[in-house]
């Protein structure tokens, strides 16, 4: 089982991302809304743990101190070489240190995906997981009609990436 430790966006930011997903879908561009199990929520992942033990992961996260809410400033659009496109938050020292603490905490509960190793992690909120180059101008137009988005983050969840099931974490990481 693969598990993702995710920050969930406030209602306003969640709605803004879902509207971008909807606009992409209306243009025939598959967004995260229709990807795999179709139960995705707008989120920013701190870590993805492959072959993870759910209970051990929850226990490891429970030992981390509760953190104050944070604000993400989504003001950039990016792509990964495998065609995933996303919104990028400004990377603050606080965001980077939080992610490193989460990654270190869950390393012993499964195999930490290489893209979530501190120093290699690129924070992102996924829009479309399989973007074709020909669709890049259309996606950019949708994104730049909306950016910037400021998201308050007050909660986190552990998400089973194969089913979309998510369990709220007891405190913000």
Image (spheres, grey):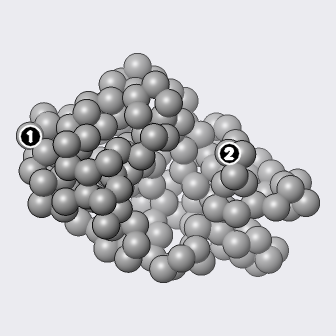
The location of residue 26, given as percent across then percent down, is 76, 78
**Are the residues flagged by discs 1 and 2 in contact, CB closer than 8 Å?**
no
The residue shown at (20%, 49%) is 109
Q: Is residue 152 visible?
A: no
The label shown at residue 173 is none
Going by the picture, which residue comes out furthest to the top?
Answer: 93
Residue under label 2? 80
Tell me the element at label 1. Answer: loop
User: Residue 124's image quarter?
Assistant: top right
Residue under label 1? 63
Which image quarter is the C terminus in?
top left
Q: Is residue 8 left or right of residue 156?
A: right
Crowding near the residue tagged with mark 1, few <14, some 14–19, many ≥20 C-alpha atoms within 10 Å: few
Tell me the element at label 2. Answer: loop
Tell which of 139 and 121 is nearer to you.
Answer: 121
Nearest to N terminus: mark 1 or mark 2? 1
Q: Is residue 109 visible?
A: yes
Q: Is residue 84 left or right of residue 50?
A: right
> Marks 1 and 2, how far apart in space?
33 Å
Is residue 169 shown above or below 66?
Answer: below
């Amino acid at each position: 089982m693969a598990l993702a430790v995710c920050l969930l966006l406030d209602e306003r930011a969640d709605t803004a991302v879902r509207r971008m997903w909807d606009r992409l879908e209306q243009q025939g561009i598959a967004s995260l809304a229709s990807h795999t199990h179709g139960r995705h929520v707008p989120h920013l992942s701190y870590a993805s743990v492959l072959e993870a033990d759910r209970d051990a992961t929850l226990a490891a996260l429970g030992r981390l101190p509760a953190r104050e809410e944070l604000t993400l400033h989504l003001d950039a659009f990016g792509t990964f070489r495998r065609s995933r496109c996303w919104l990028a938050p400004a990377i603050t020292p606080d965001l980077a240190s939080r992610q490193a603490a989460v990654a270190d905490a869950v390393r012993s509960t499964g195999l930490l995906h290489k893209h979530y190793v501190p120093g290699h992690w690129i924070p992102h909120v996924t829009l479309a997981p399989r973007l074709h180059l020909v669709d890049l101008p259309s996606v950019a137009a949708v994104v730049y009609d909306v950016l910037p988005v400021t998201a308050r983050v007050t909660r986190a969840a552990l998400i089973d990436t194969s089913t979309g099931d998510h369990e709220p974490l007891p405190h913000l990481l």
